[in-house]
Amino acid sequence: MAGRLDDLAAEYAYPLPLHLGQKRVIVRSAAEGAAMLSVLRSALVERGVEHLQPRVRAMDIPRAGRLRVWLDWLELSPSEETPRLSSGVYYNRMTPFGLRTEMVAYSRVSMPELKPQLTAHALIA
């Protein structure tokens, strides 16, 4: 939410498959990742979300330099009594530059109305 999208996009390994329910999007570069994060951030700001709160539900024991993290994201907004929630599994691997996320599979997406925008953006970016 702080707008440091390039820094966040650099934390992923590319190409990055994103599973959004039944849809799959491939983000091919950090530039595409930052652009998609910008679309997401704009939608959150427009809805009045001020803070995203991560909640780790479970984590694998690292094996062969890889681990999975089950994560919930709560969208905190003063205008909404009940925060919206996204849930996903983040697949990570150790690289020479540190831990990088190499795939994300969302089981619950808080903004289903945004799926077509993210898909279209990834296909044309």
Image (cartoon, rainbow, N blue to C red):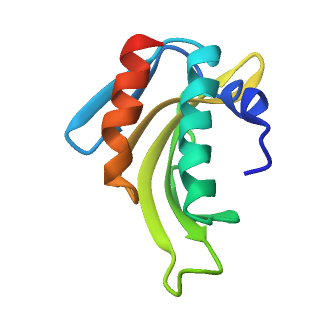
Q: Decide if residue 57 is in sight here.
A: no
Residue 42 on image: x %, y %: 60, 45
Q: Residue at x 53, y 81 (%)?
A: 80
- Above or below residue 125? Residue 8 is below
Residue 44 seen in this snapshot: yes
Q: Total of numbered circles in the picture?
A: 0
Residue 122 vs residue 18, the one in the foreground = 122
Vertical position of residue 63 compared to residue 107: above or below: above
Left or right placement of residue 88 versus residue 69 in this view: left
Q: Nearer the viewer, residue 73 or 94?
A: 73
Residue extending farthest to the bottom is: 81
Most extreme residue toward the front is 46
Q: Percent position (x, y) of residue 41?
A: 61, 46
Quarter of the figure with residue 34: top right
Quadrant location of residue 53? Answer: bottom right
Q: Quadrant of residue 78?
A: bottom right
Query: Does residue 72 lie above or below 79 as drawn?
Result: above
> Which residue of the protein is positioned furthest toward the left in this rendering?
22
Which residue is painted at 31% across and 36% down in the image? 116
**x then y, percent, for residue 84:** 46, 70
Residue 92 image offset from top left, x and y in percent: 55, 34
Residue name at image x 78 percent, y 20 percent: 97
* In this picture, residue 35 sits left or right of residue 26: right
Seen in the image, is 48 located left or right of residue 23? right
Residue at (53, 87) in percent of width and height: 81
